[in-house]
């Protein structure tokens, strides 16, 4: 190991190994692609960077030398077709290994990567392409996203080129009754594409599009570095709220360094092991767990290029690939919980983490009982790296997301900016005076939203929590999720946790419904466990259950039973979709 991470951080610990200081040192010339990926490639070329596979059976192990070679070829190809420093490039590549080639190449070029999900529709794409003056779109041929882009590209004059990646299936290849793959005519899929000769081997012919794989394979491996600054725009995400268009969250190169704390002190990655964060590359969690911090720690990441989440498949992969550290949202842990967890060999696992939603105590306890492992919860946003968490060598409290990490000064504040007392719910705020590494530069092209979130020396997250006497933070909900009923402020998480303790409730989402008398009333949308019937008697039983377990005013006055809850591609429950449906 080259211990690259130690070049960029000043740390201190207690005698018990608890982190007390974590100051990022960001050189003006720092570029993640050159100073991390290429450095390891040159000096430790055979170190594994990523193990990748898909449900079709294709597998690849990429060393850092491989990543340098392919990212150099990708950078040369993109430069040849006109991509240059400062360009905004929309990247829709699911979990394909080409995402890592593109992400590293764009950093080398000084272009701004704008990842997006394949679930976007025409309206979503027009807003993104026009809002950021996207010059280039690099998209997968898996699914229908290329057609959606074709439907709107004529409305977006900034787009100069469309580039298509053949996904070699991406988990979508049909099979016959015997389970044999049925790839499109003239194409290949599966184990025959494993190994070096199968990388970027398949073309993607489509009218109006350039073929990424063919172009990259033909490109030179000799790339001339482009001068960049760590403060140049590097990455941008579209972050949706409950109303209005998504915000454009712009990050500079310090964001990569900010994720050192994510990987080193929360994921606790093992540089000789393999880390698995289950996240689609269209969402910020992918670079949280599959790119920046892990490679700064010289660790290998694992990627499974699936389309549909199958809990048993994930549990099998832990054994097959000797996964050592795992991170996924609570929803995915809960779905795995519904399998016979004890029948799977999870002995390679050393450490488990979660973020994206609050961790319910029943899930925390179940995972500990059946695997012997604690789930270490963490908190952050598209706008930030990890900001609050249960770090290594600390003792989590079930239901708490932990304490502020030493990289940031974090407070819970009232609306007037004063600090809340212990036990008092307020907004999570992060000090930005001076502006620390990893916190977004701005909401791109929206000075109003930037000023509303970043003022008086603080970044206002829009998330609410309370803090106990020992400094542990307890999540309440998004400002938008908090239910204001009859003068009370009710967070959905507590009610959900209580309801999940009832044997009838497999999953639940709590939201507010407009009410002429109380302003809002609490609604619980419930997926029942097998063998239960959603009738009036059960509704009364669940309401009584909540009244007996927490403050009676929090009980759900409305209970709706559904077959499944709306989710993002990463498994997070979309409460906003429930609210929108209720509001017509």
Image (spheres, rainbow, N blue to C red):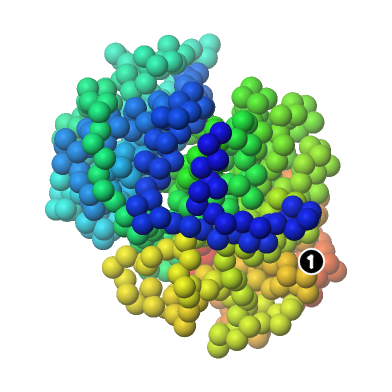
Q: Nearer the viewer, residue 287 or 521?
A: 287
Q: Residue at x 75, y 33 (%)?
A: 341
Q: Residue at x 78, y 55 (%)?
A: 15
Q: Residue 526: name its quadrant.
A: bottom right
Q: Which residue is mark 1?
A: 546
Q: Against 20, is 265 above or below?
A: above
Q: Residue at x 29, y 51 (%)?
A: 228
Percent x, y of residue 148: 28, 43
Is residue 564 in sight in this rendering? no
Q: Against 207, is 295 above or below?
A: below
Percent x, y of residue 530: 74, 41
Q: Residue 490: name its quadrant.
A: bottom right
Question: Label 1's element?
Answer: helix
Q: Residue at x 26, y 58 (%)?
A: 132
Q: Name the quadrant of the N terminus.
A: top right
Q: Callout 1: 10 Å neighbours few (<14), some, many (20+)? A: many
């Amino acid at each position: 190991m080259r211990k690259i991470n130690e070049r960029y951080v000043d740390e201190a610990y207690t005698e018990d190994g608890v982190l007390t200081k974590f100051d990022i040192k960001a050189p003006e010339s720092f570029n993640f692609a050159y100073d991390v990926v290429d450095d390891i490639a040159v000096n430790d070329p055979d170190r594994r960077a990523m193990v990748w596979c898909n449900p079709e059976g294709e597998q690849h192990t990429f060393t850092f030398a491989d990543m340098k070679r392919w990212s150099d070829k990708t950078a040369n190809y993109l430069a040849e077709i006109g991509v240059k420093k400062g360009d905004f490039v929309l990247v829709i590549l699911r979990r394909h290994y080409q995402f890592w080639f593109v992400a590293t190449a764009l950093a080398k070029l000084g272009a701004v990567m704008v990842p997006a999900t394949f679930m976007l529709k025409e309206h979503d794409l027009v807003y993104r392409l026009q809002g950021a003056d996207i010059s280039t779109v690099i998209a997968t041929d898996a699914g229908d996203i290329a057609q959606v882009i074709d439907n709107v590209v004529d409305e977006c004059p900034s787009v100069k080129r469309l580039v298509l990646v053949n996904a070699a299936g991406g988990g979508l290849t049909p099979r016959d009754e015997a389970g044999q793959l049925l790839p499109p005519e003239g194409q290949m899929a599966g184990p025959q594409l494993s190994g070096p000769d199968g990388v970027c081997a398949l073309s993607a012919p489509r009218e109006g599009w350039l073929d990424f794989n063919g172009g990259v394979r033909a490109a030179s491996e000799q790339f001339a570095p482009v001068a960049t600054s760590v403060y140049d725009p590097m990455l941008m995400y579209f972050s949706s709220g409950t109303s209005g268009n998504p915000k454009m969250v712009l990050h500079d190169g310090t964001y990569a360094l900010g994720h050192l704390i994510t990987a080193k002190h929360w994921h606790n990655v093992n540089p000789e092991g393999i880390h698995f964060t289950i996240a689609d590359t269209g969402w910020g969690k992918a670079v949280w767990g599959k790119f920046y911090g892990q490679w700064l720690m010289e660790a290998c990441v694992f990627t499974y290029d699936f389309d549909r989440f199958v809990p048993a498949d994930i549990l099998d992969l832990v054994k097959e690939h000797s996964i050592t550290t795992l991170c996924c949202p609570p929803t995915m842990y809960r779905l795995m919980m519904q399998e016979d967890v004890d029948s799977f060999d999870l002995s390679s696992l050393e450490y488990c983490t979660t973020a994206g939603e609050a961790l319910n105590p029943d899930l925390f306890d179940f995972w500990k009982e059946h695997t012997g492992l604690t789930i270490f919860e963490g908190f952050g946003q598209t706008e930030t790296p990890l900001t609050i968490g249960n770090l290594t060598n600390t003792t989590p409290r079930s239901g708490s997301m932990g304490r502020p990490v030493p990289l940031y000064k974090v407070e819970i504040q009232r609306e007037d900016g004063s600090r809340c007392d212990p036990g008092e719910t307020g907004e999570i705020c992060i000090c930005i005076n001076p502006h620390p590494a990893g916190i977004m530069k701005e909401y791109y092209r929206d000075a109003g939203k930037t000023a509303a979130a970043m003022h008086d020396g603080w970044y206002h997250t829009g998330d609410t929590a309370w803090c106990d006497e020992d400094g542990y933070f307890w999540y309440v909900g998004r400002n938008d999720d908090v239910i204001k009923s009859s003068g009370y402020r009710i967070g959905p998480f507590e009610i959900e946790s209580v309801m999940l303790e009832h044997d009838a409730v497999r999953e639940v989402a709590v939201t507010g419904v407009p009410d002429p008398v109380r302003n809002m009333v609490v609604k619980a949308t419930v997926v029942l466990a097998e063998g239960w019937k959603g009738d009036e008697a059960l509704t009364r039983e669940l309401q009584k259950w909540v009244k007996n377990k927490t403050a009676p005013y929090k009980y759900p006055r409305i209970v709706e039973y559904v077959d499944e809850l709306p989710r993002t591609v990463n498994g997070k429950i979309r409460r906003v979709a429930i609210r929108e449906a209720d509001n017509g």
